[in-house]
Amino acid sequence: MTAAPTPTSEDTQVYLPDFCAAGTLFIVLLVAELVAIVLTLAAHEPGGQFLLQLSKISFFVLWLTLLGSAIMCQLRKWLEQAGKTRAFLLSFASLEITCLVVAELSWQLMWRFGGVSIIDDPHSEFLLRTFAISSIFIALGMRYLYVSSEWRRSIVLEAQARVSALQALIRPHFLFNSMNTIASLTRTDPRQAEEAVEDLSDLLRASLSSTRDRTSLKEELEVAAIYQRIEKLRLGDRLKVRWNIDQLPMRARIPSLTIQPLIENAIYHGIELLPDGGEVIVTGTRDGRHLQIAVSNPVAPGKARNKDGNKMAMANIRQRFELAYGSRASVSIDDSNEQYTVTLRFPVDEDAS
């Protein structure tokens, strides 16, 4: 009989935000104030004192939110080890108890010392209404967090699957051409054939081991350079690559397998179709807290291969950039003046110098 799997903290950590973080607290307080406005509008009667009612409800709701966030912050370690179902039940119970305790204290303090209540209801009705409203909003909030976390998780899994598919796509036609080139070199230049085998081995090793979401810019550029050297053996003087990357911080992180596919597309859809070949230019610049890498190649007028593979690679890179950086990064294409240029723009890590 196998034991039940122990819940991992990763699932719960994605499910529940970090209530200890200032950014999370700000968003929660903002939502709480919106809830207070909705409750005030729902209870407001014509001729009533709207601002006074709003101030009382806002005071009550914001204190509830602050105390609830503090409790969720303190319970974070236990929630991460509890699994999704237990985390939900523990969070719901803790927040509900907090709401009822604060509601009771607020009622007692305001009636005994101020003679006013937050809502003009009898004691039991006030507690019951507080319980019902808080239950609805807590349940809806927890449900939203769960659905959004599952959505983000599905995107991550899809992106990882796309990376694996991209790794597999490197091999078929490229491996076939590379092995043919190496086979011919074994007869004409055994030493160069040996170097080509080593380069091919390094490239495949890097490709197969590239399971991380991000890698250093140095490693990514090395993979692209190895790929270029192997293709250079096949195309000879028809292929030239210029690397203008001195401004780039090599410790910066970038989604893995992003530059090499751009070099591959530049060669396959550009250089190979030109009778005299051409030059691929890789340019890297830094603009404050952002890096920009552009890969440019000449195109043959009136000649084009099936662009489905190119479109899939570009869609893959765009999706992984959006997943990694959101709106802070961009992937743009300029297809003009018989030049095809893809530009990657993304934020640099704080520790990359």
Image (cartoon, helix red, strand yellow):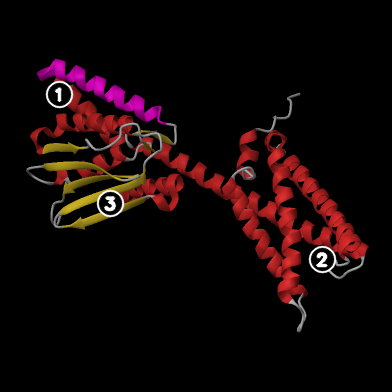
Identify whether 196 is placed above or below 276. above
Horizontal side of 302 relative to 78 (left or right) equals: left
Residue type, label 1: Ser
Of 114 and 4, the residue lying toward us: 114
Q: Residue at x 83, y 49 (%)?
A: 97
Tag 3: residue type? Lys
Query: Is residue 139 visible to us here?
Result: no
**Residue shown at 27%/29% (left/top)?**
222
User: Quadrant of the image for the C terminus?
Assistant: top left
Real-space CA distance between mark 3 and mark 1, rounded to the nearest whole angstrom: 30 Å
Which span of residues is magenta-colored? 186-210
Relative depth, front residue between 231 and 33: 33
Q: Amino acid at mark 2?
A: Ile
Q: Which residue is mark 2?
A: 118
Q: Is residue 23 left or right of residue 107?
A: left
Q: Which mark is residue 184?
A: 1
